[in-house]
């Protein structure tokens, strides 16, 4: 575990080192993974050019300002969280063990992260880590299914169930970093995957039809305000018996466009959702080998993701972009997967 002075030093140097030659200075920064048996993480310009290897690991998350990478590295005891400074070209361990790295969020101001800590089995602990001060806040323990920061970076929302049962008996909660107060925003036991939008709206999924569907509930997306009120349904997705439905991934800067992922047995693919009309568009023609979403550009015109992973076959991944309205894929990095973008 890094000590406080070292962590402060990294952040202080990030603030003063000139970055004219770095991808983050000119455009967005792209991160991705290459390799399956011995995966490594990389960063590059947003068009895939100028690649630099960070080190062994996978599942990299670039900060919104494009200066810091959080990624996962396997160890003998499980997985640890690594922090890498692009300006310094150096990394350090930040959290060990890191639990369920897909439940993760950067604060919009790039000063904090929210992530789960704990062993492979049993309840996990949700933590907020301030990268400047080194302060760590324990939010609570349980079985989490999503976390997201507010636009002002002073609050988070998260989905939490107290047992590992399926479907999860989950609700959405809000936590204030300034006051330490927690508020329960939903009370139905079916609310999962909250995502805080740039204009204050919180989109989340409700698990519907658990008693009437044979294999499990179907997710439909709803939206509510910051107080858990003015709830309205956004999507009316057709969910086949072997699918779960939609989960939100990211908003455009104006909050009108939402990138989601449709998941289920042997299927996972990106779906573009218009928040104003509820209209949906799948961004692939083949749900089994098609386009897995990762991020949406701030202007909402472009979606980043991976194609060619497949299910149980011989993967030939590529990091690509696709227009939000659908269309031809543009290959950024052949042989790569798990991409992320800075703002």
Image (cartoon, rainbow, N blue to C red):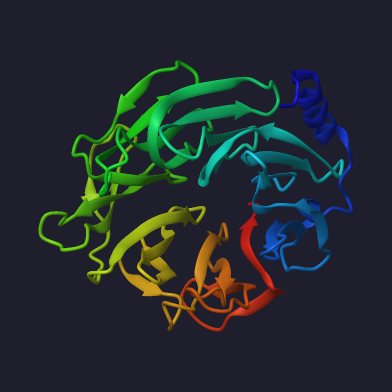
Q: Which of 18 and 321 is in front in this view?
A: 321
- The residue at 44%/70% (across/down) is 269
Q: Position of residue 106 (x, y in %)?
A: 58, 40
User: Relative to residue 127, is residue 227 drawn left or right?
Assistant: left
Task: Relative to 123, say whether 210 is above or below.
Answer: below
- Quadrant of the rendered structure where residue 246 is? bottom left
Q: Which of 108 and 277 is in front in this view?
A: 108
Q: Give the residue furthest to the front.
A: 76
Quadrant showing the N terminus: top right
Q: Where is residue 36 in the image (x, y as percent from the top left)?
A: 66, 65
Q: Where is residue 193 in the image (x, y as percent from the top left)?
A: 37, 47
Q: Where is residue 286 in the image (x, y as percent from the top left)?
A: 43, 82
Q: Is residue 27 visible?
A: no
- The residue at 51%/28% (across/down) is 154
Q: Is residue 283 visible?
A: yes
Q: Give the residue furthest to the top.
A: 179
- Quadrant of the rendered structure where residue 33 is? bottom right
- The residue at 54%/21% (across/down) is 137
Task: Relative to 213, say whether 342 is above or below.
Answer: above
- The residue at 47%/40% (across/down) is 148
User: Relative to residue 225, is residue 312 drawn left or right?
Assistant: right
Task: Relative to 6, say whether 73 is above or below.
Answer: below
């Amino acid at each position: 575990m890094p000590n406080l002075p070292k962590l402060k030093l990294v952040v202080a140097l990030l603030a003063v080192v000139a970055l004219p030659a770095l991808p983050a200075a000119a455009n967005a920064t792209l991160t991705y993974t290459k390799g399956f048996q011995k995966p490594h993480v990389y960063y590059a310009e947003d068009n895939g050019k100028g690649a630099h290897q960070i080190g062994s690991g996978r599942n990299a998350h670039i900060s919104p300002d494009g200066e810091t990478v959080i990624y996962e590295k396997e160890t003998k005891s499980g997985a640890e969280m690594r922090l890498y400074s692009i300006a310094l070209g150096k990394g350090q361990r930040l959290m060990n063990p890191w639990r369920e790295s897909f439940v993760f969020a950067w604060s919009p101001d790039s000063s904090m992260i929210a992530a789960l800590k704990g062993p492979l089995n049993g309840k996990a602990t949700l933590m907020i880590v301030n990268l400047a001060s080194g302060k760590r806040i324990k939010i609570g323990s349980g079985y989490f299914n999503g976390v997201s920061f507010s636009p002002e970076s002073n609050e988070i929302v998260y989905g939490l169930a107290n047992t590992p049962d399926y479907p999860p008996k989950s609700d959405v909660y809000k936590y204030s970093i300034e006051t330490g107060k927690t508020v329960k925003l939903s009370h139905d036991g079916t609310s999962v995957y909250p995502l805080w939008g740039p204009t204050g709206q919180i989109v989340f999924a409700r698990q519907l039809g658990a008693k009437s569907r044979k294999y499990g509930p179907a997710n439909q997306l709803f939206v509510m305000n910051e107080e858990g009120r003015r709830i309205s349904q956004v999507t009316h997705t057709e969910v086949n018996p072997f699918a779960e439905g939609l989960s939100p991934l990211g908003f455009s800067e104006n909050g009108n466009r939402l990138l989601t992922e449709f998941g289920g047995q042997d299927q996972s693919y990106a779906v573009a959702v218009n928040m104003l009309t509820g209209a949906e568009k799948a961004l692939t023609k083949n749900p089994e080998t098609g386009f897995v979403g990762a991020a949406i550009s701030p202007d909402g015109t472009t979606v980043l993701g991976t194609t060619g992973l497949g299910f149980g076959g011989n993967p030939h991944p590529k990091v690509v972009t696709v227009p939000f309205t659908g269309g031809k894929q543009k290959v950024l990095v052949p042989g790569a997967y798990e991409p992320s973008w800075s703002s």
